[in-house]
Amino acid sequence: MNLERTAKRGRTVLWAMVGFMACESILFRYAMPTDLAMQLTALMTGDYAQQAVRFGQEIPLTEAAHRVFGALMLALGMLQFDAGLRRRRPSVHRAIGTAFITLAMILSVTALIIGLQQPFAGGPETLLTVMLVGSFLLMLLTAVAQVRRRRFAAHREWMIRAYGFSLQVVVQRFLFPPMVLLGMPGPDAFMTSTILAALIALAAAEWWLRVTRMPVPAAVPSAAPV
Ligand code: HEM
């Protein structure tokens, strides 16, 4: 496999995913007339549209913070893959990294508020949200701990896992509507699509880590006496 070409194509796909999520989160919700947005939501995801209306009425600020900071976090994360920027301006890489972690914290807190207060799929969704947020934070904390110890290879791996994991939101948007259209009840489709999306996103991140991991050089037999 030509790794450089795959990486270039991969970056284009990732930017498209981030752009899609920014449109869905911000433009679709705040720039489109609300009635039209709700009609389209109902068309694609059935009774989930009522959930979208509830968000707007009951927790508009939490919803807005989740949407806007989530989209911003995804865009900032993409900049960290720019090897030129990392090499030429390490201070910019560090500043973006700090902003990314701050936004990830806000995203996690707002996800927990939504998942605890307004879960579309009830108790199982609350549990799932706690597990997803917990895993996401654990990956980020591990990445930060590694970079503090100057273990850059391990830091890269954990950041790729965390970022890949956060992209499960995009994968979920492509799984949820077809499941509803195939007749699955909304809450079941929501849970199934979210779990599948998290597994697919994690598998994709692990695959990329595996193909880009440097082979460990074979041990050189030592001439020194044991
Ligand atoms: C670890 C990452 C994330 C978790 C655990 C998470 C969790 C959640 C939860 C629990 C909900 C409410 C679902 C319901 O209606 O019951 C939600 C909704 C939402 N999230 Fe996230 N989220 C994450 C990342 C993101 C990111 C990165 C974005 C990017 C913008 C985002 C955008 C949205 C939007 C737009 C909604 C509104 C509902 C919808 O359109 O489906 N989320 N999220």
Image (cartoon, rainbow, N blue to C red):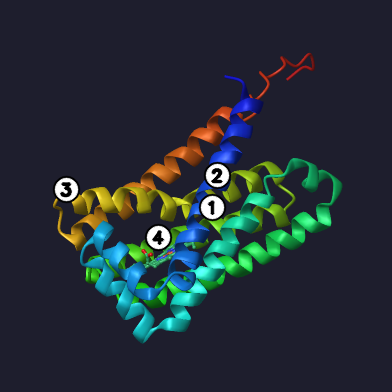
Label 3 to label 1: alpha-carbon separation: 27 Å
What is the three-letter code of the residue carrying label 3? Leu
Q: Quadrant of ligand 1?
A: bottom left
On the image, the x and y values in percent for residue 140 come to 57, 58
What is the three-letter code of the residue carrying label 1? Val
Query: Disc 4 beta carbon < 8 A from ligand 1?
Result: yes
The quarter of the picture where the N terminus appears is top right
- Secondary structure beneath dot 3 equals loop
Q: 193 or 205: nearer the eye?
A: 193
Residue displayed at 59% across by 63% down = 72
Q: 219 or 111: nearer the eye?
A: 111
| Residue that label 4 marks | 132
What is the three-letter code of the residue carrying label 4? Leu
Q: Are marks 1 and 2 in contact (CB under 8 Å)?
A: yes
Query: Disc 1 beta carbon < 8 A from ligand 1?
Result: no
| Residue that label 1 marks | 18
Single out the mark in the foreground, 4 or 2. Answer: 2
Residue displayed at 56% across by 69% down = 69
Single out the mark in the foreground, 1 or 4. Answer: 1
**Precedes in sequence: disc 3 or disc 2:** 2
Image quadrant of residue 217?
top right
| Residue that label 3 marks | 182
What is the three-letter code of the residue carrying label 2? Leu
In this picture, is 8 found above or below 172?
above
The crowd level at tag 3 (other Cα within 10 Å; few <14, some 14-19, many 20+) is few
On the image, the x and y values in percent for residue 35 come to 33, 74
Image quadrant of residue 56?
bottom left
